[in-house]
Image (cartoon, rainbow, N blue to C red):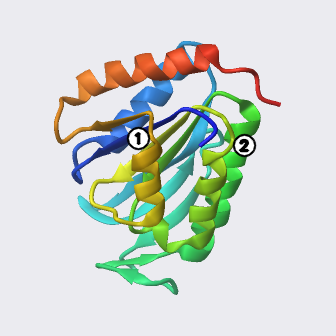
Amino acid sequence: MKGPLFALTGPPGSGKTTLALRLVQDIRAQGHAAGGVISLEVREGGRRTGFVMRDLLTGEQELLATTKGGRGPRLGRYFVNVEGIGGFCRRALERARQQGGLVVVDEVGPMELLSEEFVGAVEEALGWGRPLLVVLHQRSAHALASRIRASARALYSLAERPPELVRRELLEALLAELRAAKPYY
């Protein structure tokens, strides 16, 4: 790991993605750049039918998984878009790197980890020297998730502490790193 790495974890539905989005807003409100990817639910008629991966800089989205069938591998009731998410993630992370500031990866979880290109893109980002926030699936035993847990400067868990307390502490740590970071070109 070249740069400061912060990890956020917690049980499904604990608010990890919501907290990551809030931190991006907070970081930007302080005048710092923040980009990367975030995974969001797709709901139809009140039911979750899938997930999309969104580029935090452009707003572009790529289907991550759907219940409506597909060509990708099946994980539970979802068909995972392995072919699409790796390249999408790589491009979004590269845009974030070029902008400087915080790089966000949400989520290093079972669906995303089916894509070798996604894994490679995240591994590259770990070596960039930029402040990095990674949201981790709580129970993932994948080598990448284990490496992130072992290398993180701090691992914040929503299973153990209230989201607002975690947000304040993590924001303070991220802002300190962003203020100290050298410009990246």
Alpha carbon separation for disc pair 2 and 1: 21 Å
Quadrant where the N terminus sits is: top right
**What residue sits 21% from the left and 51% below the top?**
11
**In the image shown, does 81 or 179 lie closer to the viewer?**
179
Q: Which residue is mark 2?
A: 95
**What residue sits 39% from the left and 79% below the top?**
68
Compared across the picture, whether 136 is left or right of 119 comes to left
**In the image shown, does 141 or 135 lie closer to the viewer?**
141
Q: Position of residue 62 (x, y in %)?
A: 57, 61
Circle 1 Cα neighbour tier, 10 Å, few/some/many (<14 / 14–19 / ≥20): many
Q: Position of residue 80 (x, y in %)?
A: 46, 75
Mark 2 against mark 1, which lies toward the viewer? 1
Compared across the picture, whether 150 is left or right of 59 comes to left
What's under tag 2, amino acid-wise?
Arg
Q: From where the camera sits, is residue 104 visible?
A: yes
**What residue sits 61% from the left and 75% below the top?**
83
The dot on residue 100 is: none
Secondary structure at badge 2 equals: helix
What's under tag 1, amino acid-wise?
Ala
The dot on residue 7 is: 1
Q: Position of residue 103 (x, y in %)?
A: 59, 38
Q: From where the camera sits, is residue 56 visible?
A: no
Which residue sits furthest bottom? Answer: 71
Quadrant where the C terminus sits is: top right
**In the image shown, does 35 or 1 lie closer to the viewer?**
1
**What residue sits 44% from the left and 33% below the top?**
153
